[in-house]
Image (cartoon, rainbow, N blue to C red):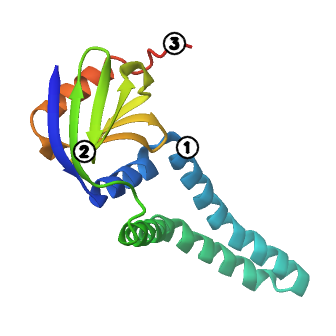
Amino acid sequence: MGRLDYVLTDDEYIALARHEQVNGPGFAANLRQQRWIMTLVPPITFAILGLLTDSLQYLLPAGVLLGGVLWFSFPSLYDQLVSRQLHAVAKRGGLGRTGPVVLTWDQWRLHENFVGMGGYVDWTRFIRVDESAEHVFLLVGNADGVIVPKRAGAGVAALAAHARRFVGTAPR
């Protein structure tokens, strides 16, 4: 039914990780929880210290102020941390295999020939089909799936549309 040829780079793995960081159900919920914890710990800690040292009127406002600063700066700080970690792993070659990919598909499954190794995924295994400005992500799990850069050509849209027909149809 279709064929795409492209080269997979570390940038694609970074794009998937960044996409899942924001859009992945488990990742997004975890990020919200971390933000709340980071915001609430300073006021609570400073309030306890204020009660213990009889300085509540000074320490509680300082804790609330610090919590507010962390609330507003957390997304930026977290983004910088993740970016540094991903680029460090990419330098070591640990994000995943890179190189030429031949992706073909028929009505039953998606076939991937990647760096001389082949594999396939039945359409019903895909749990999500997500898109960013530059990629289509065919996901079989959280942050696990097939990354297709849109630069691969016009067939990317057809592939995404075909895959979406099968999301949620896995036998239970």
Q: Residue at image x 42%, y 44%? A: 23
Q: Residue at image x 77%, y 74%? A: 45
Q: Position of residue 101 (x, y in %)?
A: 22, 43
| Label located before the other in sequence (2 or 1) | 1
Of the 4 image quadrants, the one containing the N terminus is top left
The 10 Å Cα crowd at callout 2, few under 14, some 14 to 19, many 20 or more, is: some
Compared to residue 82, the image places residue 135 above or below, namely: above
Dot 3 and dot 2 residues touching (CB under 8 Å): no
The answer to which image quadrant residue 34 occupies is bottom right
Amino acid type of the residue tagged 1 in the rendering? Gly
Tally of numbered tags: 3
Per the rendering, the mark at residue 26 is 1
Residue furthest to the front in view is: 116
Pointer 2 residue: 135
| Label located before the other in sequence (3 or 1) | 1
Query: Which is more toward the observer, 107 or 40?
Result: 107
Instruction: Determine the secondary structure under disc 2.
Output: strand
